[in-house]
Image: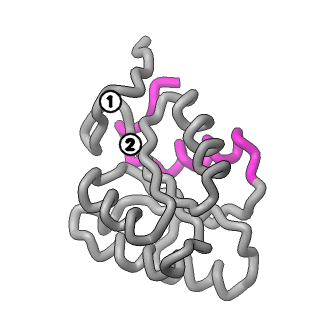
Amino acid sequence: MTLYNPHMEADIGSAIPKILAVDDNADTVTILSSILERAGYAVISARSGAEAIELAERELPALVLLDLILPDRNGLDILEAIKKIAPLKNVPILVVSAMSDKYSKERSYSLGVREYLTKPIYPSDLLNRVREHLPRGNKAAC
């Protein structure tokens, strides 16, 4: 059994999947990170759209959790920007947002979101969705 070391580097091809969590709320980022790290994932986080795009380009995460309400840009704009980054074109993006309106959901799916999760979300539901959408061979050893 491999133990998780939060100081280890992770990338798309590594044994520890790297997940980008994007949310402007520090508490939400802390909670998401804690849930995912305890399950064996490496987590990088962004609190703004600009930071999310920069980290996505630099870190090439295996999966992205994206809030739609961000301080500098609409989450849908961030979704489009990440999908335009060639190595991330097919990376799974899961929206995790308090927005539950029909337009946000339909637009997210039309832009390539794999799953739309409405806050609050149970940790077990989050982990099940993450495991379901991570590329094969890129699952944490839980």
The reply to whether discs 2 and 1 touch (Cβ–Cβ < 8 Å) is no
**What colour scheme governs how the chains and residues are painted in the rendered image of this protein?**
one colour
Could you say where residue 14 lies in the image, as x and y percent from the top left? 27, 34
Residue 7 appears in the figure: yes
- Quadrant where the N terminus sits is top left
35 horizontally vs 138: left or right: right
Residue 115 appears in the figure: no
Q: Label 2, label 1: how many angstroms apart (C-alpha)?
A: 9 Å
Which of labels 2 and 1 is toward the front? Answer: 2
* Residue 58 sits in quarter: bottom left
Secondary structure at badge 2 equals: strand
99 horizontally vs 69: left or right: right
**Magenta-colored span:** 121-142
Vertical position of residue 126 compared to residue 140: above or below: below
Vertical position of residue 89 compared to residue 26: above or below: below
What type is the residue that disc 1 sits on? Ala
For label 2, the residue is 18
Label annotation for residue 71: none
Could you say where residue 77 lies in the image, as x and y percent from the top left? 45, 81
Decide: few, some or many residues near mark 2? Use Cα within 10 Å; few <14, some 14-19, many ≥20.
Answer: many
- Specify whether residue 140 is painted magenta: yes
What type is the residue that disc 2 sits on? Lys
Tell me what residue is drawn at x 70 percent, y 46 percent. Answer: 125
Secondary structure at badge 1 equals: loop
- Specify whether residue 52 is painted magenta: no
Label annotation for residue 15: 1
Q: Nearer the viewer, residue 42 or 15?
A: 42
Tell me what residue is drawn at x 49 percent, y 80 percent. Answer: 73
Vertical position of residue 42 compared to residue 133: above or below: above
